[in-house]
Image: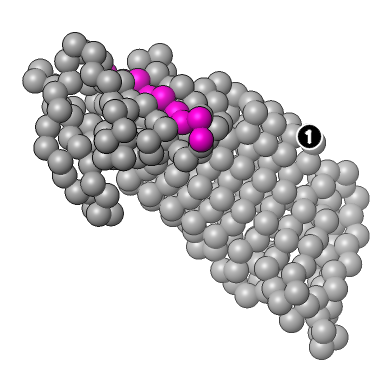
Amino acid sequence: MLATVRLQSDGINLLTVLQTLNGGLTLDVSVLGTFTITATDSYNSTDSDIIASLADAAVLEGLIGQSGSPDIIQGTSGNDVLDSSLLGFSSERLYGFDGDDVLNGNDGNDLLRGGTGNDTLNGGAGNDLLIDGNGYDTMNGGSGNDTIMISGTGFESVNGGLGIDTLTLLGGINLDLSLHNNITGIEHINLGNEAEGSTLTLTAQDVLDISDTDILAIYGDAADKVTLETGAIKGAVITDANNVTMTEYTWSDSSAKVWVENEIVAAGGVNIII
């Protein structure tokens, strides 16, 4: 069912909401002041509501489409707060674009993308995907098995939160964990599949600092490099929970363990510094 939407507003900021229906629907909503939203469906059924702030955008879920269906919420070139925490268990997609934005997911499996500016991304519950932008971003996965993607090392902080969380490197990044004490709550690192490869350098203490389990699993391909500092010991070949073949590395004086995907190992991509 495709609806026609009419808006009346006295505000000046713009929020774009796209509800996934048959044929699709896009709303441009001004949210600084109050506004009235009226939707008329293809059967000429009409309903209206008055919305006073962005936090009340949850009424759109009951007004348009079925409860729990995904919404796309987009910010503007200003400093926006996009809060989907009132939308229950639906899986939302929040895009900050320009400005220093705050994006809050809900209990569903959300996608949050910061854009340019110094953004704060809070996934909340659920298995969320957080993607940084070009700024000094703060990314908090929350509970659930989250994936946090970074395109560089100029972020404020990364915290995977509860669950088995993955940090994915985009674009061939060189990441030295000993130089970054702002990464926590991460159990997996994916070095990506870029042709130029990524490089990861770490110590036993880095593993203890970054992972809540004292085990760090590293995934990648033949183009990627892993450097293990201060006397790592190559151990047995194991298979992880996803049936990926890994090689285990340990330290004699630490409880830390590193599992490296065998595609990296077979290509000679693991360098151990004594």
Name above or below for residue 2 compared with residue 256: below
Q: Quadrant of residue 51?
A: bottom right
Q: Position of residue 79 (x, y in %)?
A: 73, 33
Q: Is residue 200 magenta?
A: yes
Name above or below for residue 100 compared with residue 108: above
Under mark 1, the amino acid is: Gly
Give the magenta-colored segment's residue range.
195-203
Q: Quadrant of residue 38?
A: bottom right
Q: Name the side, left or right, on which 238 lies relative to 118.
A: left
Q: Name the side, left or right, on which 49 lies relative to 134.
A: right
Q: Position of residue 158 (x, y in %)?
A: 46, 30
Q: Position of residue 246 (x, y in %)?
A: 23, 41
Q: Secondary structure at mark 1?
A: loop
Q: Residues within 10 Å of mark 1 (few under 14, many from 20)?
A: some
Q: Is residue 232 magenta?
A: no
Colour approach in the figure: one colour
Q: Residue at x 85, y 86 (%)?
A: 44
Residue extending farthest to the bottom is 43
The residue lying toward the viewer, choosing from 152 and 184, is 152
Q: Residue at x 88, y 44 (%)?
A: 12
Residue extending farthest to the left is 252
The answer to whether any part of residue 163 appears in the image is yes
Q: Position of residue 139 (x, y in %)?
A: 51, 34
The C terminus sits in image quarter: top left
The answer to whether any part of residue 120 appears in the image is no
The N terminus sits in image quarter: bottom right
Q: Residue at x 31, y 21 (%)?
A: 227
Q: Which residue is mark 1?
A: 78
The residue lying toward the viewer, choosing from 38 and 257, is 257
Q: Residue at x 37, y 36 (%)?
A: 222
The residue lying toward the viewer, choosing from 207 and 139, is 207
